[in-house]
Image (cartoon, helix red, strand yellow):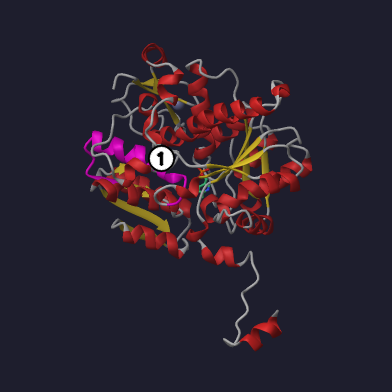
Amino acid sequence: MNKFEGYRCSICGAEYLPGQVVYACPRDGGNLDVVLDTDSIKKKFQAEDITSRTEPSLWRYLPLLPVSEPAGDSTPLHASGWTPVFAMPRLAEKLRLKHLWLKDESRNPTASFKDRASAVVVTRAREIKAEIVVTASTGNAGAALAGMAAAVGQKAVIFAPKSAPQAKVAQLLIFGAKVILVDGTYDDAFDLTVKAADEFGWYCRNTGYNPFTLEGKKTAAFEIWEWWIEAHRDWHKKDSGLDNHPPLTIVVSVGDGNIISGIHKGFKDLLALGWIQNLPRIIGVQAEGSAAIANAFHAGTESIAPVSANTIADSISVDLPRDGVRAARAAQHTNGTYITVSDDEIVKAIAELGAQGVFAEPAGAAAYAGLVKGTSLGAVGAEDPVLVMNTGSGLKDVRAALQAVVPAPIIEPTLDALKKLL
Ligand SMILES: *Cc1c(COP(=O)(O)O)cnc(C)c1O
Ligand SMILES: [Zn+2]
């Protein structure tokens, strides 16, 4: 485990040893980056040692993670990550893009991207022998923590706003977590969780507060890297004039900003290892009603002013993003940008993805809605190869999904009635 050297504050740059801090920077509350000993990793591993592994989960990247192998070997905790990438030729044509793919995170064990973070945090919790893990959540982070914890018999406590979609609350309860619904917002639940963890000595998974969530989320970047090597090889077989194509553009929805920061961190790790030469472009998409990071990005400042969040996309409905600074940098340092979308555009995107066989929850579809807008605004060009992320399953919020379609007709069960209808 000596590959894990400690932490570095993303604001003041202070460095800490693994045992010195647990959550944020004690000086300024900045998000902590996990520091890995890339030199010793580089000595032990070549890129091919990773890409030739057969493990079909995020644990194929164990040498690049600050935890050791979780105990047991065939639980849902071991099935997080390694999600499929689908080609989207019809949507590409519609948007006049040459190449468009979608990485479908709804296929994680609890049906959202959050499983990546929770798998790694639960593994960390076992290592430090935490009795109880707690998180605040709009729903998915909690479902992921509850599910991953249940998989290995770890106790979990979840705080969520009472407005969380029913399916997400059902997941929390079914996974056997202690579920406490807060009469307030996600931000209220977040603050209460931090206080409760302090008071009762619980291990807190809160997004953007616990440094290990980012380490789990960065594995999506590793998967994109591996997939891109293959996709590239395929291109070259078909057309050798592709050497000068623009870099890959990744489009992802943003609430607290931890997913986009995690993807950025994963690519930075690969750069530090010398396994890639350039970073892909990363574009963040926020709901117009929850756009604190996009606002700061376009104002050219790193000071993130809170908003009063209101959007159908509950998973990205956040007043004060907890990983806003790193999230803004993810776009800034990669020549990306931020795009905001309306709830109407999000609902429309649910239907458009559905017509391709992909069922996304509002926050998942928001990324595609952002891509649609990005192509019309010129932020994404026709030649740009684009990978859009779907971060969560539509089954988590069927009420929102039903807004995207016309209701099915009800008829008498007779041929006559059917003929009349047709
Ligand atoms: C959490 C979540 C997001 C946003 O991730 P952040 O780290 O909060 O930016 C997007 N989509 C879904 C489905 C999520 O659950
Ligand atoms: Zn600091």
Judge left or right: residue 420 versus residue 76. Answer: right
Residue 12 percent location from the top left of the image: 48, 23
Residue drawn at (27%, 35%), measured in percent from left and top? Answer: 70
Is 168 drawn above or below residue 69 in the view shown?
below
Residue drawn at (40%, 61%), measured in percent from left and top? Answer: 169
Judge left or right: residue 143 versus residue 230. Answer: left
Quadrant of the snapshot with the C terminus: bottom right
Residue 8 percent location from the top left of the image: 43, 23
Residue 253 percent location from the top left of the image: 58, 44
Viewer-proximal residue among 85 and 251: 85
Q: Quadrant of residue 230?
A: top right
Residue type at tag 1: Ala
Is-magenta flag for residue 47? no
Classify mark 1: helix, strand or loop.
Answer: helix
Residue highlighted by disc 1: 117
- Neighbor class of circle 1 (other Cα within 10 Å; few <14, some 14-19, many 20+) is many
Residue drawn at (60%, 52%), measured in percent from left and top? Answer: 365
Q: Quadrant of residue 4?
A: top left
Is 382 drawn above or below residue 49 in the view shown?
below
In the rendered structure, which segment of residues is drawn in magenta? Answer: 111-133
Residue drawn at (62%, 50%), measured in percent from left and top? Answer: 366
Q: Quadrant of residue 42?
A: top left
